[in-house]
Image: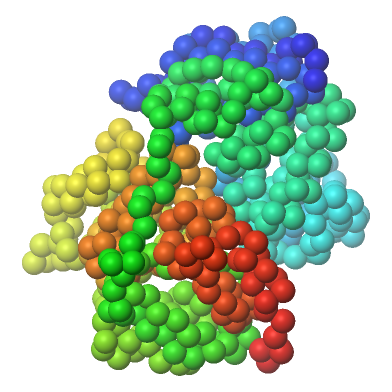
Amino acid sequence: MTDDVILKISNLSKSFGPVRALKGVDFELRKGEIHALAGENGAGKSTLMNVIDGILQPDSGEISIDGQRVKIGSPAVAQKLGIGFVHQEIALCPDVSVAENIFMATTNTSRSFLMNYHALEKKAAAVLGELVTIDPSTLVRDLSISHQQLVEIAKALTLDCRVLILDEPTAALTEKEAQILFRIMRRLAGKGISIIYISHRMVEIFDNCDRVSVFRDGCHITTRNVADVVPDDVVNAMVGRVIDELYPRKQSEDERSEDVILDVRNLSERTRFKDVTFQIRKGEILGLAGLIGAGRSEIVKGICRLEGKVSGEMSLNGLPLSLTSYKDSISKGIVYLSEDRKGDGIFLEMPISANVSALKPEQVANALGLIVRYKEEAQAARLAARLNLKFGALTDPVSSLSGGNQQKVAIAKMLWVDPKLIFLDEPTRGVDVGAKAEIHRILRTLAASGVGILVISSELPELIGVCDRVLVVCEGRISGEVSGKDMSEENIMHLASVGGVRPSLH
């Protein structure tokens, strides 16, 4: 890293109606540094990055590159200036190949009438080889979320960037994939490429970044050398207060109940999981851990009848449970919060209120089946207040919200149906530390009120901090359970990897 400033933001402001997203922001990026941006959702980080990338235009202020004032009117202009942006939300074309996605910008500017697919796939394989083994001819829609994220990163690496923006790039990655990305980041920085790294994970910031800038409520609060601060300094600057408890108090021995909300016996699906048996008890939060591809999401989707043809027995509050579709599951009060917020969790261009009511709009419909908007908005407003949702108006599209507030809308949608059982798949992915604490508190309150809660998370500290028990899945089977003093990252990882050597499911 040098002291040479490659990108300078001066007194930049941006508003969306009455909401001031950025308020006179100053920011500097040096040549060859990895500069972390930290802040709660809605703090202005993504808005600033969208301005730098030309997606949004500022109301006032200046942007300079290498000391020269520039106007970045579009993402195409940003690319010409050497700015690459890997968004938090995956923005690939699902119906074309990996190779076509990676070189889409090059293909669009080509004068050739015919595409040489063989050459394109060969070039894509060379870029992907640094990150992951993926067949470049594969359609993007057939990839896992983590592999789609790696394709996004590979796409950015082909743009010959001088400034690379990474917005929550590891949210969908395994630990192994994340470590590969960090090595590439350090190599790029060594070549003089400057990286803006947005993350809510303090360990990533302190292990990989040179400086950290903190944003709060649209303002730049501070910039510090990472070597001169500790994580608590950054967290406290982010929220403007001391967060004493990220995780709420768990059940005590006296509070534990033997009443079973959900009882699952020998649940199987032909290729993805087999003989899964577990219970969710009243008042507890049950965790589901395992490596990517172990079958965690598939198990809960099978229960909800979202995908797969499953066999086995289930009961809900002591009564036999037989479901034929997800609509049937919702009618029984069983809902699933998807890990893919953009693809399955919300409708980005619909109003906030319509998203919240989407699972059961008939609750606010009149005798003719038409939605009564004031009733819908009144109920949505109550849930928004309960989740501390930051928004302009309930009629605004969900796309106008930050990633963390979009996640809160997805959770509000679950609460709309007054559920008996909620499966939450990566509920705090891409959510800041303050919002995480709020979501954890909400989950504990729901569990205490009698709602069954199961949390799937790739963040082991989250599972250990929020859950009363954790079941571990390995190769489609429950390989073990941990609770109390045995609930450690080492024990969970052992069960997730070593503990699941099983015969084939076929």
Q: Position of residue 429 (x, y in %)?
A: 51, 50
Q: Nearer the viewer, residue 231 or 110?
A: 231
Picture quadrant of residue 86: top right
Residue 478 seen anywhere in this rendered image of the structure: yes
| Residue beneath the point at 36% across and 58% down | 250
Is 248 situated above or below 217? below
Which quarter of the image is occupied by the N terminus? Answer: top right
| Residue beneath the point at 76% across and 42% down | 182
Residue 358 seen anywhere in this rendered image of the structure: no
Is 489 situated above or below 206? below
Picture quadrant of residue 257: bottom left
| Residue beneath the point at 66% across and 89% down | 505
Position of 8 with respect to 262 (left or right) is: right
Position of 313 with respect to 274 (left or right) is: left
Picture quadrant of residue 467: bottom left
Q: How many numbered callouts?
A: 0
Which quarter of the image is occupied by the C terminus? Answer: bottom right
Q: Position of residue 100 (x, y in %)?
A: 76, 53
| Residue beneath the point at 26% across and 89% down | 319
Position of 492 with respect to 21 (left or right) is: right
Is 273 situated above or below 95? below
Q: Nearer the viewer, residue 248 or 289?
A: 248
Q: Position of residue 42 (x, y in %)?
A: 42, 32
Q: Position of residue 226 (x, y in %)?
A: 66, 25
Position of 295 with respect to 443 (left or right) is: right
